[in-house]
Each structure stands twice: as structure tokens, then as C-alpha cells.
């Protein structure tokens, strides 16, 4: 990696409409920077974007200056925060977890508590509602990529997840990720 390369996380949220990704990515390209990583989703009536932007110092200075333009011209709330490149730990295993069940408050927290107590880092997490056929019962779905420390006893983790999921009437699958 180039020593002059700098990084900024850009978070933008606002009313959803076609063209937002094009408009924001154009501003970043015009600044001379590059989008290295991104997450984007419609949440309710809002469109949310989280971008890792990188480039030479001058390009990142220009990106840091586009916040007002993003807010004024695109109608998005914008936060820019300088960061460093990721330095992931080398002593972990990637795992993927999926949890599903009838929707109710506290599912994410119950799973997150088990992971935190085991020293597991959540690298990505997505959740959404779907509706069961015929009954239209709201069904909660969670998918996450986990960084599990090599020293973690997977049998203990599976037992903790199984106990909580049984108590909460949830299904889960935990498998090695890539």
C-alpha cells in the first residue's frame, strides 16, 4: 500500500430515490478518490450508504470537503470520518451465522450478547423481516460474518447459541465462512 494513501468513511442517509448512488459516486470520482468498500440499503423510506473511500492525500482532502454538497445538492445527511486501512487480526477463523424465527424485540441483542461474551467480533450483520406464506407472520432473519478467535471452543459457542435459540424459539446455523 502507498504510504500517501488515506482513508475516510463516508456515511450518508436520506430519502430514497433513483440516482443517489450515481450522484455520490460521481462526486467521489471527481475528487480523485476511490470507493474501496460499501454497504447500501433502503431502510424504511430512507436510503443509507456507508462507504470506505481511499486515495492520495489531496483527493481525500477534496472528499472531506464534499459534505456540504452531499447535504445541499443530494438532500442527504452526511458524516465523514478519517480512518486507517483495516488491519484484521490474524488469529481468528471466519464463520457465518444465520438466525431465523418469529419476529419479536431483542433477537439481535440476545445473539450479540453471546458473541460479545465469547470475544467474537461481528464483521458484518444484516437483518430483515419476511412474511410467512399463508399466515403472513413476520419472520426475522439475521445473517452475520463473524471473526471467531482461534482459541474459542466452538462446542461452547454452539451450546450457548443452541440454548438461547431454543429458549427464544429460533433456528440457527453456524458454519465456517470464507
Image (cartoon, helix red, strand yellow):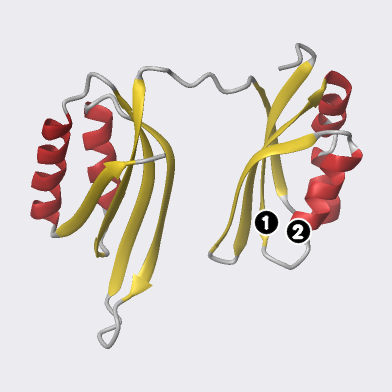
Q: Nearer the viewer, residue 119 or 176?
A: 176
From the top left corner, tell me how far across and down residue 140 is, in percent. 31, 63
Task: Looking at the image, tell me whether mark 1 or mark 2 is earlier in sequence order.
Answer: 1
Q: Residues within 10 Å of mark 2 (few under 14, many from 20)?
A: some
Secondary element at image label 2: helix
Q: Residues within 10 Å of mark 1 (few under 14, many from 20)?
A: some
Question: In this orientation, does residue 152 appear?
Answer: yes
Answer whether labels 1 and 2 touch (C-beta < 8 Å). yes
From the top left corner, tell me how far across and down residue 157 is, in percent. 17, 34
Distance (Cα) linking label 1 and label 2? 9 Å
Q: Which mark is residue 68?
A: none
From the top left corner, tell me how far across and down residue 76 is, in percent. 73, 52
Tell me which residue sits at (80%, 27%) in the image. Answer: 55
Classify residue 90 as left or right of residue 78: left
Q: Which mark is residue 20?
A: 2
Residue indicated by mark 1: 14
Q: Nearer the viewer, residue 102 or 162?
A: 162
Classify residue 168 as left or right of residue 80: left
Question: In this orientation, does residue 75 appear?
Answer: no
Figure quadrant of residue 116 = top left
Secondary element at image label 1: strand
Q: How many marks?
A: 2
Taking 150 as reference, is 147 above or below it?
A: below
Tell me which residue sits at (59%, 66%) in the image. Answer: 45
Classify residue 87 as left or right of residue 64: left
Taking 87 as reference, is 62 above or below it?
A: below
Task: Check the image and name the residue furthest to the top.
Answer: 3
Tell me which residue sits at (27%, 44%) in the image. Answer: 175
From the top left corner, tell me how far across and down residue 83 is, in percent. 64, 22
Q: Quadrant of the C terminus?
A: top left
Q: Nearer the viewer, residue 171 or 154?
A: 154
Amino acid at each position: 500500500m502507498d504510504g500517501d494513501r488515506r482513508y475516510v468513511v463516508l456515511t450518508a442517509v436520506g430519502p430514497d430515490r433513483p440516482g443517489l448512488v450515481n450522484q455520490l459516486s460521481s462526486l467521489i470520482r471527481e475528487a480523485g478518490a476511490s470507493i474501496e468498500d460499501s454497504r447500501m440499503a433502503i431502510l424504511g423510506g430512507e436510503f443509507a450508504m456507508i462507504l470506505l473511500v481511499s486515495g492520495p492525500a489531496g483527493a481525500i482532502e477534496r472528499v472531506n470537503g464534499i459534505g456540504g454538497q452531499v447535504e445541499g445538492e443530494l438532500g442527504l445527511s452526511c458524516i465523514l470520518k478519517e480512518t486507517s486501512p483495516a488491519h484484521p487480526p490474524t488469529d481468528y477463523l471466519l464463520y457465518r451465522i444465520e438466525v431465523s424465527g418469529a419476529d419479536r424485540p431483542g433477537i439481535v441483542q440476545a445473539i450479540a450478547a453471546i458473541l460479545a461474551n465469547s470475544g467474537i467480533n461481528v464483521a458484518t450483520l444484516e437483518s430483515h423481516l419476511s412474511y410467512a406464506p399463508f399466515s403472513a407472520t413476520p419472520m426475522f432473519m439475521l445473517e452475520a460474518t463473524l471473526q471467531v478467535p482461534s482459541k474459542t471452543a466452538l462446542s461452547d459457542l454452539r451450546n450457548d447459541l443452541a440454548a438461547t435459540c431454543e429458549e427464544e424459539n429460533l433456528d440457527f446455523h453456524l458454519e465456517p465462512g470464507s
